[in-house]
Image (spheres, rainbow, N blue to C red):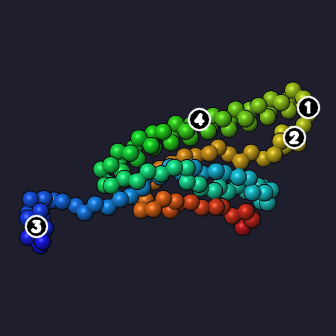
Amino acid sequence: MNYIKAAFDAVCADAKPASSAYVSLYVNLPYYGGPEEGGWWGSDTELVAYHEVSNDVEAKAISEAVQKMADEMSTEAKDRFNRSCAASVEWVEEHDPMADVSDYFPEPDGEERYWVATESRPGEHVSQGSRGYE
């Protein structure tokens, strides 16, 4: 059997061992933590989806396509966040022009941000931010 492996190795001198990896889509979800020191924010990182790939070439191609989608999703999330903030300000200006927006609406968290990672197991970058002021 060793002669078969030796023959294979001779024919495929540049052969690389197969190794799977995962292309993962993540989202950072910001949150307002509290008013201490003028206000503080944190974020959680959640795994949205993942895809198993069998080599680096496939991982790179898929990562690039998913990153393009992630950039579009981040832009849409930022636009939604900005529209929401603008709507809150407009509502206050219409209903109680002398008030502060925070009199009616909670502190905004911020927009979601999507990003891509290639990793050896799905979910390696999942994290939860601190819920206490530090």
Q: Amino acid at mark 4?
A: Glu
Tag count in the figure?
Answer: 4
Q: Residue at x 30, y 50 (%)?
A: 57
Cα–Cα span, label 3 and label 2:
75 Å
Q: Residue at x 32, y 49 (%)?
A: 58
- For label 3, the crowd category at 10 Å Cα-Cα, with few meaning under 14, some 14 to 19 and many 20 or more, is few
- Give above or below for 88 relative to 124: above
**Label 3 residue SS:** helix
Q: Circles 3 and 2: CB distance less than 8 Å?
A: no
Q: Residue at x 62, y 38 (%)?
A: 78
Residue identifier under label 2: 104
Cα–Cα span, label 4 and label 2:
25 Å
- Earlier-in-chain disc, 3 versus 1: 3
Report x, y in % for residue 87: 76, 31
| Residue 76 disc label | 4
Q: Residue at x 18, y 59 (%)?
A: 15
Residue identifier under label 3: 4
- Earlier-in-chain disc, 4 versus 3: 3
